[in-house]
Image (tube, grey):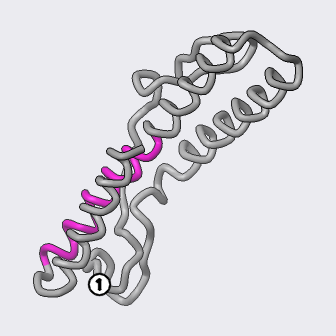
Amino acid sequence: MSERVLMDIPVVGAEAAPAASGRGCGGSDNCGCHAGGDHQHGYITAKDNYMRRLRRIEGQARGLQRMVDEEKYCIDILTQISAMTKALQSVALELLEDHLAHCVVGAAREGGASAEEKMQEASEAIARLVRS
């Protein structure tokens, strides 16, 4: 994964984040992805990747706290907030993609109320991401 460093804090942009590899279902009893009730979340095969990225974002948050504590220049802090926000958005978009690719698709294959419920959930998640 490529990264830039601003003020000694790793900055990960969407362009640097690798795509999640592999997929699963959404873990719902209604997903239709796994027979016999053995459900996996859509992100499960890329869990290590997500965890590594979230730990990096956690480090960015600690770096921001340190910058404020050390009374760094406002614009430098805002730059880091922007980078952290972009990293979180990148993770969120990949999680959404996993959800759509498996949980929603699996429910759509089943049809009925399950499909409508998953579509509504996805629409609401997208709306939250757009508003953020």
What residue is rendered at 14% in x and 82% in y? 110
Judging depth in this view, the residue of 128 and 50 nearest the camera is 128
Going by the numbered disc 1, the residue's amino acid type is Asn
**Residue 65 part of the magenta-drawn span:** no
Is residue 38 positioned above or below 89 on the image? below
Q: How many marks?
A: 1
Magenta portion: prevailing SS class: helix
Q: Give the image quarter of residue 98.
A: bottom left
Q: Which residues are magenta?
A: 91-109
Residue 91 picture location, percent across and down: 47, 42
Task: Look at 69% across and 14% down and name the residue there.
Answer: 74
Give how far across and how far down residue 80 sits, in percent: 63, 21
Q: Which residue is mark 1?
A: 30
Disc 1, SS: loop
- Judge left or right: residue 2 versus residue 123: right
Relative placement, left or right, of 42 versus 123 is right
- The image shows residue 116 at horizontal and vertical percentages of 17, 78
Please tell me which residue lies in front, 7 or 107: 7
Is 64 in front, or is 26? 64
Residue at 45%, 39% (x, y): give it.
89
Task: Tell me which residue sits at (32%, 78%) in the image.
Answer: 34
Residue 107 relative to residue 34: left or right: left
